Each structure stands twice: as structure tokens, then as C-alpha cells.
Amino acid sequence: MSLSVRLGRRANIIEETPEHAHLLCLPSSVLTDQQLAAIRANNDPSLGSTTISTLVPLVSPGHNGHQNGHAPTDLKPETLLRQSLERIRAEAELAARNGTAILVLSDRGVDADHAPIPALLALGAVHHHLIRQGLRNRLSLIVETGEAREVHHIACLVGYGARGVNPYLALASVREMAAASREDITTEKAESNLVKAMEKGLLKIMSKMGISPVESYCAAQVFEAIGLSKDLIDDCFTNTPSRIGGIGLEKLAHDMFVRHQRAFAIADQGPVVLPHPGFYKFKKDGEPHAFSPSVIHAAHDAVKYTPGYDASVDSDAFAEGYRRYRVYADMVNDGRPAIRATCLISSPQARPSQSKRSSPLSPLLAVSAPPPLAMAPLAPKPIPPWLLP
């Protein structure tokens, strides 16, 4: 398996010329700040780079300062986000037509007056716009984002067309943690460990899909979306399966602006103490979990109840045991849905299918029979060679 990627303009695939090999080779899709700076500083005119900002301005041109994170115009968050996506698409198309070989989508520069567009949304919008314009092979895409912090984030960005990802905020975080740590580890070693962990995670994801080189994984879109509307899928994630529909650009824009406003509201209050979202470990004010401590305690209370005598002949003891079980069952059944299965509702009107088109059992048994080679030792006469696999 290989994580090496090549950056640059892709020539006609049915021809073979020296220009086909004029590409910039990188050992991995996970880029450090130094590697990205070297790509930008490259003097080769045929491997020139352009950077496009993926920030949404929250104030009108010429307006100074901010008003609690809101734009001083009457534009809705969805309109601001849609306008910014159109700007990014137009700038990407212009860069491709002007000969740019490496296009960097960057969300650096976030402040009180600029909010970052979700990296995957911006990447998908540019990637599919260039495909529709017939310009995608003219350049390679790199994403410089502070949003990517997990292996899955890297895999999604690569899967939707990014040949390189620079998770600059995650890298800066581990460098700061190493500098403040009492452990004997340098900032360079901490950064290297994070990059290696992301690379190994990406290799593991690729191996599960049966893909060996990361360039075959790039833009393959081997994902299924859950909770995204058809309009959003068609616009930014074309041909991605999304079976149940879901939210659109309006909800994404609202969440983006709420997160931005909350972040800078916290920053204005003095020393910043970030709330724990509880994505991986239960936190009191974090994301709900299916097996929270209260649910586990209720389950323990139900199964550990022992009245000390035969409860089957004592109605009060049975009632108490059943009451404790109901406490646990109600917490599981009436809580906020945490997995897809909890969103399914059984219909009391459902009836078994009475279709007359049902197949009889005997043909199914014949189809499911083992192959001839497996039955050869048990056959009463030799199996004809043309039936053997």
C-alpha cells in the first residue's frame, strides 16, 4: 500500500509524453506546515500554486469591527454562505483557466468578522464545479484547514478530491501540548507522531475498502451520506448516496454561524476554557450517549435486585423488581435517539406479505446447492469436466 501522491496538471491520459511526468511527488497526503510552505514557495512555473480563502465575511465591505458576530446587513446566514461558495467556485475556475497547477483552499484567518466554511463543503463545491466545467484535471487540490483533527476527517477530504490536507490547528495543538508537557518529548516528535497516526489510520480505512494506493482513494467518494438533503448532495457531493434525506445549506449555515458566535463570545469573557463536547466520552453538558452513566446505573440496579426469597410467590417483590426494570427500559426507549435503529418505529398495521408472486421453495434450494466440486466425492457417478469450476 502507498500514501504517496503527485501534484500538478494531469495531461491527456491516452497519450504519453515527458510532460506527463512533470509532477510534484509527496510521501503522504497529510502535510505539515513546512511542507505546505515549500509547495507554495516552489518556483517551477508549471507547478505554480494559488490560495483561495474559504472564509465567510460577516461584515459588509468597509465596515469596521463586528456586532456580536452578526453581519450588519439583512442577509441571512444561508445567503452569506451561498454567496461565499459561489465566490470560491468562480475563483477556482479562474485559477484553473489561468494555468494554476496546485490550488489551496485555506480557512486561515478566522476572526470575529470571518467565519470558516466547513472544509468538506468548500472542497466538494469546488471539486464538482470544476468537473462540470471540464477543468478538474488542470489542477490538484490541497485543503489547509483547522477543522480536520481525526482520521475520518482526513479520509473524507481525500475521498472528495484533496490530494493533500494540512490540519494546521491539530498540528499546532500537539506542539503546544508537547511544549507544556513534563514528558521527554520534543514538539517535532509530537507533530511527527500525529502525522504518523493519521497516515496509519488512513491506510487502515483504505485496506478495508480494498484500495492500495491513496491516489485511487482520492476523489473515489466511497461514502454514503446520512442526514443531508438531495439538493445539497447534488450541488456539492454529486452522486453520493443519501437514502433518507436531511438538512440543507440553511441548517449548515445556521450551525456555522452559531459556533462562530459562541466561540468569540467565550473569547471576549477573558481566559478561554473550551467546553467538552463529549463526542467520545460522556460529559454532563456534552453530547448524549446511548449508554450514559445513569442508564448503566439503572441497569445494574435492575439486575442486582435480590429480595432474598422467592419473588415468584411474592407479588410485592415481583412488582419492585419489575419497577426497577421499567426505570431502565424507559430511559432507553424514551431517551433522545443516539443510533439509527432507535429512529425506527414499528407499525401495528403491518401484515405479512400475501403476494402470489412468491417463489416456491424447491428452486431456491437448487440454487443454494454447493458447487459440483464439493459434491464430487458424494456423487454416484463422475462429474463431467465441464461442470467443474
Image (tube, rainbow, N blue to C red):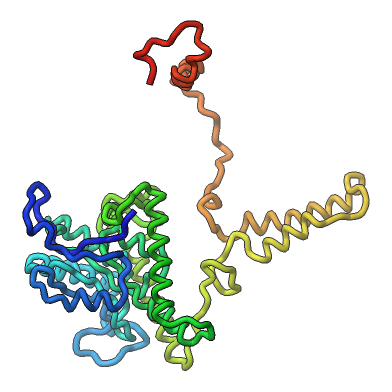
Residue at (36%, 64%) from the top-left corner?
154
275 sits to left or right of 264? right
Residue 296 appears in view: yes
Number of marks in picture? 0
Residue 379 rendering spot, x and y as whole percentages: 50, 10
**Observer-nearest of 302 and 185:** 185
Residue 384 rendering spot, x and y as whole percentages: 38, 10
**Observer-nearest of 138 and 128:** 138
Is 380 drawn above or below residue 17 in the view shown?
Answer: above
Residue at (39%, 73%) from the top-left corner?
192
Residue 231 appears in view: no
Residue 267 rendering spot, x and y as whole percentages: 43, 88
**Observer-nearest of 90 and 371:** 371
147 sits to left or right of 326? left
Q: Which of the 4 image quarters holds residue 337?
A: bottom right
Residue at (34%, 56%) from the top-left corner?
229
Q: Residue furthest top?
A: 381
Q: Quadrant of the C terminus?
A: top left
Is 231 drawn above or below residue 27 in the view shown?
Answer: above
Residue 73 rendering spot, x and y as whole percentages: 26, 82
31 sits to left or right of 270? left
Q: Residue furthest front?
A: 184
237 sits to left or right of 181? left
